[in-house]
Image: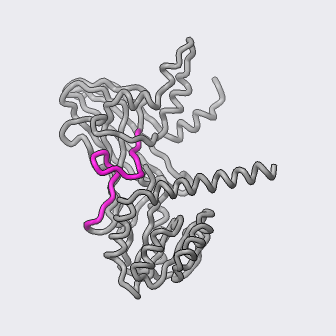
C-alpha cells in the first residue's frame, strides 16, 4: 500500500508540473499578465495579493517590476516548488501562504489582487468565489486583475465535433447504449473548435454573461438567448468561450476567432441534433452554478420554435443530472 501511495504522489506531481509547463509555455498569456502588472504596479509601494499562485510566476513578475511585497496563496503542493523557484531566482519580498485564501485569517492590505484561476470554462476554478472572498485583503480602490470576464456562446453545426463525443450511437453489435449516452452527453467537453464549425450568420456569437470584479458577483449566472435561423441548419450543441479584460487595453481571449492560447473552447452537446428550417427560432437558457457546495455545474435548456411560434422540440441537459443518472438504480 505504501508504494501505491508513493506512486500516486509521483503521478500527481508529474501531472501538475505538466499543467504548469502548458500554462507557462503560453507566451500570449504571460505577456498579457506582464503588461497588466507593469501598468498597475507602483515601484516600491504596491503590495500584491496573488490568489492561486501556482509556481509563483505572477508574483515573480510583480517583484521584478518593483512590488514592495507579494503575498502568495496556494493550497496545493505547488507551493513547495514555488518556494524553491523563488530561492533560485533570488526573489525575497514574497510571503508564502500554503493554504486556500478563503481559509486564511491573515491581515493584508493589498493594492493589487491578481488571480489567474481561469479554466477552459472560465469559471471552473471558482474565480468568482475566490476573488469575492479575497476582496477583504484589499485596500479601497485596489486594482483587480482580471477586472472583468465576458462569456460568449454560439451554436455548433459540426457533425464531426458531435461524433467525437457521441460514440454511443455507432457501437453496433445490436447493443443499446442510450442510457450511457444520456449520462455522457450531459457534460462539458474541452475541444479546439474552429470557426467553420459554428453557425455562420449575423450575431451568431452572443455575449451571455459579464463578471465585473469591481462589483459584487453571484455564483449563479443565467441568461436566455435566441437565434432566428436564416436557412436550414442542424445544430449539434453549443460552443462557449471567454474574454478576460485584465486591465483597460489588455485582454486575453479563448475565442475560436482569436490567436490560440493554451486554453481551448467548451463544447456543450445536445442529446439529439436539432434540425431547423428557415425562420425557426432556437432558444437557449444557460445556467452556471459555481457555489462552494456545487463546485461547477452547467445546465443548458434548448427549445426549437417554428416560424409561427409553435414549440417543436425541447431538450434539457444538466451536468448534475448526468452524474445522478450514473448512480440511479436500474428500473
Q: Is residue 289 visible?
A: yes
Q: Position of residue 135 (x, y in %)?
A: 45, 73
Tell whether position 44 is magenta: no
Q: Taking 164 as reference, is 20 above or below it?
A: below
Q: Is residue 308 visible?
A: no
Residue extending farthest to the right is 1
Residue at 41 percent across and 43 percent down: it is: 266
Q: Taking 112 as reference, is 132 above or below it?
A: above
Q: Nearer the viewer, residue 77 or 133?
A: 77
Q: Taking 240 as reference, is 196 above or below it?
A: above
The stretch of residues the image draws in magenta is 249-267
* Image color mode: one colour
Could you say which quadrant of the image residue 35 lies in?
bottom left
Could you say which quadrant of the image residue 231 lies in?
top left
Q: Position of residue 314 (x, y in %)?
A: 37, 29
Image quarter hosting the C terminus? top right
Residue extending farthest to the bottom is 44
Predominant SS along the magenta part: loop
Residue at 60 percent across and 33 percent down: it is: 326
Tell whether position 256 is magenta: yes
Q: Taking 151 as reference, is 24 above or below it?
A: below
The mark total stands at 0
Q: Nearer the viewer, residue 270 or 115?
A: 115
Q: Position of residue 158 (x, y in %)?
A: 34, 30
Residue at 37 percent across and 34 percent down: it is: 237
Q: Position of residue 182 (x, y in %)?
A: 51, 29
Residue 132 located left or right of residue 328: left
Residue extending farthest to the top is 174
Residue at 37 percent across and 52 percent down: it is: 261
Amino acid at each position: 500500500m505504501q508504494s501505491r501511495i508513493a506512486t500516486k504522489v509521483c503521478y500527481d506531481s508529474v501531472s501538475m508540473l505538466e499543467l504548469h509547463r502548458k500554462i507557462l509555455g503560453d507566451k500570449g498569456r504571460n505577456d498579457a499578465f506582464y503588461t497588466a502588472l507593469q501598468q498597475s504596479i507602483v515601484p516600491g509601494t504596491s503590495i500584491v495579493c496573488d490568489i492561486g499562485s501556482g509556481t509563483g510566476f505572477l508574483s515573480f513578475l510583480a517583484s521584478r517590476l518593483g512590488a514592495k511585497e507579494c503575498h502568495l496563496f496556494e493550497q496545493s503542493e505547488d507551493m513547495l516548488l514555488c518556494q524553491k523557484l523563488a530561492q533560485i531566482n533570488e526573489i525575497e519580498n514574497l510571503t508564502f501562504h500554503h493554504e486556500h485564501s478563503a481559509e486564511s485569517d491573515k491581515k493584508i492590505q493589498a493594492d493589487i489582487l491578481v488571480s489567474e484561476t481561469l479554466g477552459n470554462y472560465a469559471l471552473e476554478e471558482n474565480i468568482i468565489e475566490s476573488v469575492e472572498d479575497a476582496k477583504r485583503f484589499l485596500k479601497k480602490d485596489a486594482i483587480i486583475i482580471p477586472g472583468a470576464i465576458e462569456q460568449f456562446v454560439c451554436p455548433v453545426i459540426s457533425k464531426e465535433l458531435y461524433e467525437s463525443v457521441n460514440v454511443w450511437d455507432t457501437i453496433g453489435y445490436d447493443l443499446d447504449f442510450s442510457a450511457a449516452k444520456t449520462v455522457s452527453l450531459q457534460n462539458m467537453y474541452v475541444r479546439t473548435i474552429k470557426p467553420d464549425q459554428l453557425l455562420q450568420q449575423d450575431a451568431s456569437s452572443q455575449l451571455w454573461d459579464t463578471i465585473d470584479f469591481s462589483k459584487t458577483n453571484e455564483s449563479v449566472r443565467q441568461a436566455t438567448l435566441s437565434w432566428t435561423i436564416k436557412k436550414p441548419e442542424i445544430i449539434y450543441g453549443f460552443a462557449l468561450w471567454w474574454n478576460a479584460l485584465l486591465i483597460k487595453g489588455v485582454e486575453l481571449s479563448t475565442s475560436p476567432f482569436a490567436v490560440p492560447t493554451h486554453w481551448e473552447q467548451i463544447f456543450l452537446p445536445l442529446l439529439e441534433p436539432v434540425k431547423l428550417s428557415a425562420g425557426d427560432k432556437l432558444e437557449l437558457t444557460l445556467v452556471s452554478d459555481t457555489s462552494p457546495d456545487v463546485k461547477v455545474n452547467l445546465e443548458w435548456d434548448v427549445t426549437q420554435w417554428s416560424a409561427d411560434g409553435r414549440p417543436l422540440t425541447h431538450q434539457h441537459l444538466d451536468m448534475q443530472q448526468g452524474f445522478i443518472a450514473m448512480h440511479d438504480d436500474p428500473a
